[in-house]
Image: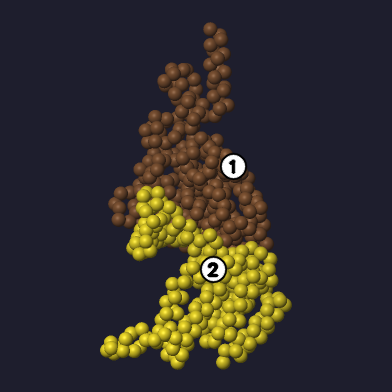
Amino acid sequence: MALPTSYIPRDSIIHKLDPRIKLVIIVCITLLVFITTKFLPIGILFFSLLVLWKISGIPLKRILSYLRVLVFLFLLLIIMQAVFYPGEKVLLEPLIPEAVPLVGGKGNITLEGVLFGLLLCLRVLTLMCIFPVLLATTTLEKITLAMVKLGLPYRVAFTATTAINQLPVLQSEAGVIMDAQKLRGFMVFETGRFLSKIKALHVLVVPLVMGSMRRASMMGIAMDSRAFGAFKKRTFVDEINIERRDRIALAVFSLFTGVILFFSF
Amino acid sequence: MGYEIVKLESVCYSYPRNKDHVLYNINLSVKKGEFIVIIGENGSGKTTLCKCLNGIIPHSERGRFRGRVLIDSMDTRSAYLSEIAKKVGIVLEDPESQLFTTTVFNEVAFGPENLNLPVEEIKATVKWVLEAVGLKGLENRSPATLSGGQKQRLALASVLAMKPAVMVLDEPTSQLDPLGTEEFFSIIEELKGRFGMTIIMATHKTDEVLPLADRICVLHRGRILACDKPEIVFSTVDLLEKIKIPVPTCFSLSNYLKDKGGLNINSFATPEEAEEEIRVLLNHQEKY
């Protein structure tokens, strides 16, 4: 399975944009999601991200896999907000009878609460949709370079992008460990209930963590043997340049930000 | 052959929390352009010795280290790892953990980039190296999607691209099939012949290294038992078999014919020499 972090080799306009511009845009969109508290601007943001996904060639089906992971969180969010958000339009009578001391009569499920819960869910989903736009359209080496050009030390930038790069490795290793345990007759991952699966998680996590620590130290050795950090300056084979299309993209995005902010307040 | 480029002086090493010596009193000097092969059973200290050669021990792995390792008269204890890396390249056994970028091209370019070389030079080097190891055309593939053998060749390429004077290879063909192994050794032959690279290789595959090696070092329980020309080392078949080192097929055959078969022949190291011996033997029989 392709992770949401994997690069998709295409030749779209978003692939061609300078990664610095993409980084700036992505940080701004993230901030916008945090600032806005209304349905319309969040809806516009979500829809525009889907358009960006389409252009970058990311399959929209991926949203479904996000939803599958997030469904519990979303249910919890909606229920919590529905019960505790102060509102006028009562949909359901108090959950807790009046007779109970202190908390009696609380817990009205209000329309405002349900709507606020839904809004939170949409915001979380929108946040999830932001990073694939960068990661699917930019190689990690270019992101590293962009971070360095934006003033981050190379070591920090390299660490950040390598961590992203190692995610698929970790995922496949987890698969191997689970298979190995299934083959030795460990049934829980296949037939167990949800709770027993969670209880059995340590047999997966311990070898996974140990394995990645060993891998990290081996990788450190391999990096040292390839002169990592030998000079203060370092060559980058990749090139990034801010061109006309980058300026246009930035202008369009500024306008877009203005529209979102206009609808937000 | 030139001056001594690698020199180990009474090197002893034991891993942390373990008093047993993994390496004990190792003395070895390697001349520039030499091809040294280290053989020994599993756990004899081959990998540890390789790690001493480029400063991973004692820099990255703790433990008790005594003695000196000199690379081009630079002491590995006082030099930075990245400085040693300019002179000694090492390819470790497990290729997976040595590959950490997103494309084959970037993987090979990583080392030269760190050395702050000009972009054009790096591009030319990467092109040449990928051609040399037979990975041409895979520049944009992700290293994770390569086969085991391709990964091992990529690990070699990425070190080769830094053009080190000394190349240390720790069982570089462990994941290659016989054909891949043959290809790998032909790359090594070219490096040795065309570029005069000094090569130190730990391996189990004695048959393949036989025609290439200048000297064979036998490592057993952390000590060097013998370090000499292949003909001399492999003529001690009994000793080698006792410490579980595979003797090249020709040597083993000639030894068997002499000892068990009672034939009066000279030892042979290659099929050609074997043919020669057999002809002599047949001629001899026809005469009587």
Judged from the image, the secondary structure of the residue bearing numbered disc 1 is: helix
Residue A135 location, quadrant: bottom right
Which residue: 42% across, 30% down?
B237
The chain letter for the residue carrying disc 1 is: B
Which residue: 37% across, 36% down?
B243
Query: Which label is found at residue A64?
Result: 2
Local crowd size for mark 1, using a 10 Å CA cut-off: few (<14), some (14–19), many (≥20): some
Q: Nearer the viewer, residue A36 or B193?
A: A36
Q: Can the viewer see residue B283 in this picture?
A: yes
List x then y, in percent, for residue B279: 57, 18
What amino acid is at disc 1? Glu
- In the image, residue B236 above or below residue B27: above
Horizontal side of A226 relative to A138 (left or right) equals left
Q: Which chain is represented by brown in the image?
A: B
Disc 1 target residue: B183
What amino acid is at disc 2? Leu
List x then y, in percent, for residue A184: 37, 49
Between disc 2 and disc 1, the foreground one is 2
Q: State whether discs 2 and 1 lie on one chain.
A: no
Extreme top residue here? B288
List x then y, in percent, for residue A114: 47, 83
Which residue: 42% across, 77% down?
A76
Q: Which hue belongs to chain A?
A: yellow
Total marks shown come to 2
Q: CA distance from mark 2 to mark 1?
A: 47 Å
Judged from the image, the secondary structure of the residue bearing numbered disc 2 is: helix
The chain letter for the residue carrying disc 2 is: A
Q: Can the viewer see residue B32 in this picture?
A: no
List x then y, in percent, for residue A141: 58, 66
